[in-house]
Amino acid sequence: MLNLNRRARELCERLVPEAESLGIRLHRLPCGTLVLDFGVDAPGSREAGILLARVCLADRAKVEVIADDPGTAPWPAVHVVTEQPIAACLASQYAGWEVKGANYFAMGSGPMRASAAREPLFRHSPLTELARQEKGVPSVGILETAQLPPEDICRAIAEKCHIGPSELTLLVAPTHSLAGTLQVVARSVETALHKLHELAFDLSRVVSGRGLAPLPPLVADDLAAIGRTNDAILYGGRVTLEVHGDDLSLQAIGPQAPSSASADYGRPFVEVLARTHNDFYQVDPLLFSPAELVLKNLDTGNSFTFGKVNDEVLAESFGK
């Protein structure tokens, strides 16, 4: 068993004693839910952002910031490596849970998604089996929002995870915060896998993944931050997936995989979003993928590269 929630919970327990030095604030709500503020009312930090990304990946991936990668200069880069890509990225990291309440909205991710298994994604093997293993265990989630969750939201999440609210841990960060920006940019491998899933690729063929995406300069509001963090992956993300199987299927699906295959490609994401009146879910879903994808066939030894980094759009988005 991969124990996604347990791994994430253990990492949370280790960071609690270091909360002050990490710029994190802790809140134990009357219902018992532990809320860790990584950037709403807390300053956060780069190290906190790395830990937030690791929790989001159920601590099944390595995350680091590289200051001098030539492929992302002049910006630092977020590097992610995982040997359990389906569990870490799709069962945990993917922001597939819309958390809604009265005057409250957040994008939910983390291994609590596997506990709840409410999304269509969990109807597909091997995610179905992962969800079965996580049902009813103390759960950990990440909320991308500028508001700390009220008790009714915590209770509703816990109920969907089949646990009591005192068994729930929630980590919260707005997109524009330092930690929030970093954890979103750490989704390069996840976007590649989700795109392949949308293209009906057999994800059981994927053995490992590594990704690199530039960390954009911080910006004051969440909408602009959503634009920059998405552009970091859409126009600057480079992902390599190691896979098994035949070469012909890789060559067939590869041209559809990078972000450049979408009709919405070519302009900063904030402009694309504006055309949908800021409705994230009206954007072409095939846009959400890295700029460059390398499929490395472990059986044949051949590698195939699709797409490329778009420095011009990155410079326009991040500011020259």
Image (cartoon, grey):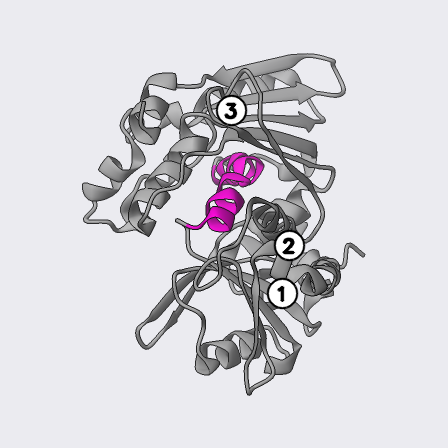
Q: Is residue 184 magenta?
A: yes
The residue mark sitting in front, 2 or 3, is 2
Give the numbered dot on residue 140. Answer: 1
Q: Specify whether residue 168 is in view.
A: yes
**Label 3: element kind:** helix
> Image point 55% across, 15% down: which residue?
70
Q: Residue furthest right?
A: 1
Q: Which residue is mark 2?
A: 55
Q: Nearer the viewer, residue 97 or 131?
A: 97
Label pair 1/2, CB-CB below 8 angstroms: yes
Label 1 secondary element: strand
The Cα–Cα distance between marks 1 and 2, rounded to whole angstroms, is 8 Å
The mark lying in front, picked from 1 and 3, is: 1
Residue that appears at 43% across and 34% down: 216
Which residues fall within the magenta stretch?
177-198
Q: Which mark is residue 253?
A: 3
Could you say where residue 279 lies in the image, as x and y percent from the top left?
Answer: 26, 51
Q: Where's residue 115, x and y in %?
A: 63, 66
Whether the magenta-drawn stretch holds residue 97 is answered as no
**What is the three-letter code of the residue carrying label 3?**
Ile
**The one of 235 and 207 positioned closer to us in this rendering:** 235
Q: Quadrant of the N terminus?
A: bottom right
Q: Is residue 148 left or right of residue 79?
A: left
Q: Residue 20, percent across and down?
A: 61, 62
Inter-mark Cα distance, 2 to 3: 31 Å
- Mark positioned earlier in the residue sequence (2 or 3): 2
Quadrant location of the C terminus in the rendered image: top left
